[in-house]
Image (spheres, coloured by chain):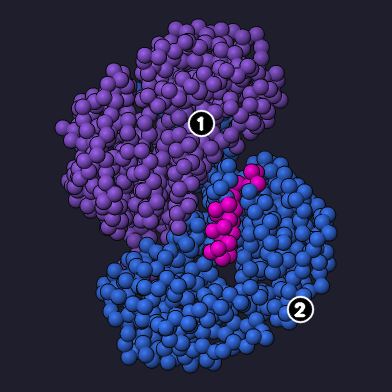
Chain colours: A purple, B blue
Amino acid sequence: MNITGENIIGAEKSSGNQETVTVMDPKSQQMLPEQFHVASSDEIELAVQKAQRAFAEFSRLSGSRRAEFPRAIAEEILRLDVALIERAMKESGLPEARFKGERGRTVGQLRMFADLLEEGSWVEATIDCALLERTPIPRADIRKMLVSTGPVVVFPASNFPLAFSTAGGDTASALAAGCPVIVKAHESHLGTNELVSKAIQTAAEKTKMPDGVFSSLTGNGYELGSMLVKHPLIKSVAFTGSHRGGLALHKLAQERDEPIPVFAEMGSINPVLLLPSAVETNHKLAQIILGSVTMGVGQFCTNPGLLVAIKSPALGHLKEALQEEFAKAGSFTMLNEGIHKNYESLKKETLAHNSIRPEAVVEHDDTEWSGKPAVVSVDAGDFIGNADLHREVFGPFTMVVECADAHELASVVCSLEGQLTGTVYGEEMDFNEYSAAINELEHKVGRIMFNQMPTGVEVCAAMQHGGPYPATTDSRFTSVGTGAIRRFVRPQTFQNWPQSRLPKALQDGNPLQIWRWIDSNWTKR
Amino acid sequence: MNITGENIIGAEKSSGNQETVTVMDPKSQQMLPEQFHVASSDEIELAVQKAQRAFAEFSRLSGSRRAEFPRAIAEEILRLDVALIERAMKESGLPEARFKGERGRTVGQLRMFADLLEEGSWVEATIDCALLERTPIPRADIRKMLVSTGPVVVFPASNFPLAFSTAGGDTASALAAGCPVIVKAHESHLGTNELVSKAIQTAAEKTKMPDGVFSSLTGNGYELGSMLVKHPLIKSVAFTGSHRGGLALHKLAQERDEPIPVFAEMGSINPVLLLPSAVETNHKLAQIILGSVTMGVGQFCTNPGLLVAIKSPALGHLKEALQEEFAKAGSFTMLNEGIHKNYESLKKETLAHNSIRPEAVVEHDDTEWSGKPAVVSVDAGDFIGNADLHREVFGPFTMVVECADAHELASVVCSLEGQLTGTVYGEEMDFNEYSAAINELEHKVGRIMFNQMPTGVEVCAAMQHGGPYPATTDSRFTSVGTGAIRRFVRPQTFQNWPQSRLPKALQDGNPLQIWRWIDSNWTKR
């Protein structure tokens, strides 16, 4: 499939604007030849108007009918075959195996939401039947279910060009919720975006979805994003990226006449408590840490950027092992120039602190955008007192915080901001001695783990990918797993509503055979 | 029980500040004798610090243990007996029967949340067991449930001095969620607030809840409220009141370093579509409308402030009947001077529009704060084009919008902002002819009704009291019914977590015997 640089506006391909942008190959640092048309304000307006028009029909489709769309998107993505993998590799510098895996995850997510729609119970149908004999006043027939909120703007992530971009988790969950989607294409992988957008467009056509159910627009700087977020017909925003970017969108959305939710996933240092039993007995710990820190060149939101441990001879040995492992580790191309520059400058700023001890830090070779894995250490007191050291260094970087005792370990956890994940390495019996730190860690994170590294986020019903601010703007929602659909729906109550006009999910006789909450029980009757 | 004017700060009663405020009796327009101490900034800080300290313990109590607290609050409120009813009557001008009913609702809500905690399934336990044989990578054991977010500030409503005030739905649901509560006492009913706050304090003591689980503070102007909302340890805010007040708190909360959710319920005109079949055949319609418009002197958030109908001789008859009914209706004291002034001035501004026809509007007697029921009419074209006429006139007021046909009826609905409720009066066969208007109404409201007036909000599992902006700041949540608890919780995932350390709700063997989501099914196994 040729890359033409067009914007996708519902069923149309559009290149009205002569202004174009290009994409860089991060490995060669050469511009790729394709020119991508920047969406004009007319094209932006058209995409939003079409999304709004599509909403009325799309939000009322039955679950099984709506499920055809994500299922067809998965098919069309697979049909792109090597062309997609090659383009994604070229635009990201990441290897083939990674994209075969990521494509599997992308297709898997789309099918998971199709399954969810077909099963149908996700609408949380709740029924309180009429109590006509109740005194002093009878109770009406009251029924509730989740319904769609309206058009969604998706700002994709740079670090998952497939699984968290154009047809990624945000788009899949918003479409599943019955909300049309407008993607602001990520400037680092515009070609990958175009291939996937056209696959979605084809899927929409084949499954006869309303025109406007999906659009994808290319921008230049902040204009496109802010126009979309400020548009009164847009009802929510999903974003994955930097703290600064996420917060700017959140502020913009709150300053609208009608404030709207921005689900921003903005990063995390993902603290790992290495309890003495683990440090003393787990001889693979240094390798496990290196593997997790360097996965995806450290460009994962769940990268373990903080290792908190108690000073001991064993910790000394672990640091030596880390030095050895990190020194041996290769370095790989990072996603784009901005991420690479940011990694190098934050690493440099961190190292400039007097209290920081470089454990394994290799000098940077400026000719390549490659991320050299690095590990530093610091004493707990210095860490607690210095907010700069709590910042995420996005890339293959981690910091060992050395504590005097269990009390100081708890103090380090107390000093942390909200995080996506928290991890405890140790033995079960440690929970008594370190309960203060572990309990505090629970309050700070969305997902807490035992003896497993935080990288590798499972896509499933029980996953919570999200956490207290500033990890995300709203800890009450997840961007990964079936729960992600809840971001784009609201409960609606039908009172004394005619049976024939009720959505099927709420009708007597339960024609969809879904689980419903009736009289304090889930039932399929 | 004596009213002492003290602030309630956890287990303490405090009157450190010599500055005091008083409350007016709206019937006599005389100041009541009691002096209420304004909370000092030290007292505010103490209440927040205590709430934060209480959070760690309170949020980890088992459901059955935590349920003791709302159940004891209900007991203590009943124990206040006539003293509470009399004080609430004196401070609000509302009659005894109303408060007997409202007390029943308040106590009922508290017990409903106690039942919910004891039953336990509300935590939405979700379990994905490990798949150790899965290729290419095994799946870890992943379990998710809802956990508490942190201290909540409640801004009570003036119009429900019991059921939506100090121990009302917001407080009950936040406490049920495991979040300590700080109430900013409503300035119109400080005595009622004190009686209820002391009942809650006694209940906390009797059930041995941690000190700081509940506080109630009196303020003077905006200072107390803004100090609480801006405090970094506060994690969410619940508010019921004016659009201006709710929006101001929302903005304040979004400008914090850590933005937090503000659940503001800000009012609604609750459109009622009177379809021709209803106008022609329902001869009690005028009485039904009057009853709903004047319930609680029109001071209900679900007051039907807009009646949309198609011009016809039958509509002429209905208007005559409304004139007759409204003219006969008595007028009753409104809640406070501000509400009364606002009612009179908005009514006057509305009547000043050329397009408005007064149908039954009585001249106001300035010596009393009483709300005279009023009905006006307007042509659809004039209504659609004039945003002023879409404002809520809080009080016993309604407006008939007269449309030429079904198309204009739909246009009126399209022109509306988000609403708490929408109502259709008619016959089932009307749904075909008026589907455009009815479908559009669904998108605009949180609760939609057929042949029932919106006043009288049932407290149950299927209730959605909330709706698209500007009815509330967040249509994804409800402030009435068991669903209200969801505002104050977030999902948390435990991955590979030791069985013995998992919350009981997630343990193998389901020791709490709750409903859990496992393998796409709700099960108690």
Q: Position of residue A343 (x, y in %)?
A: 46, 22
Q: Position of residue B376 (x, y in %)?
A: 45, 84
Marks 2, 1: nearer the viewer = 2
Q: Residue sitting at 70 percent across and 81 percent down?
A: B27
Please give the residue where the numbered disc 2 appears in the rendered image: B30
Q: Which residues are magenta?
A: B231-252
Q: Amino acid at mark 2?
A: Gln
Asked if the magenta segment contains residue B245, the reply would be yes
Instruction: State whether residue A113 appears in this view.
Output: no
Q: Secondary structure at mark 1?
A: loop
| Disc sitting over residue A2 in the figure | none
Q: Is residue A85 left or right of residue A113?
A: left
Q: Which quarter of the image is occupied by the N terminus of chain B?
A: bottom right
Instruction: State whether residue B83 appears in this view.
Output: yes
Determine crowd level at label 1: few under 14, some 14-19, many 20+ residues with C-alpha closer than 10 A: many
Q: Secondary structure at mark 2?
A: strand
Do marks 2 and 1 share a chain?
A: no
Q: Position of residue B117 (x, y in %)?
A: 60, 51
Q: Residue sitting at 69 percent across and 43 percent down?
A: B52
Q: Nearer the viewer, residue A503 or A352?
A: A352
| Image mark 1: chain | A
CA gap, disc 2 and disc 1: 57 Å
Please give the residue where the numbered disc 1 appears in the rendered image: A268
Q: Amino acid at mark 1?
A: Ser
Q: Residue sitting at 52 percent across and 18 percent down?
A: A348
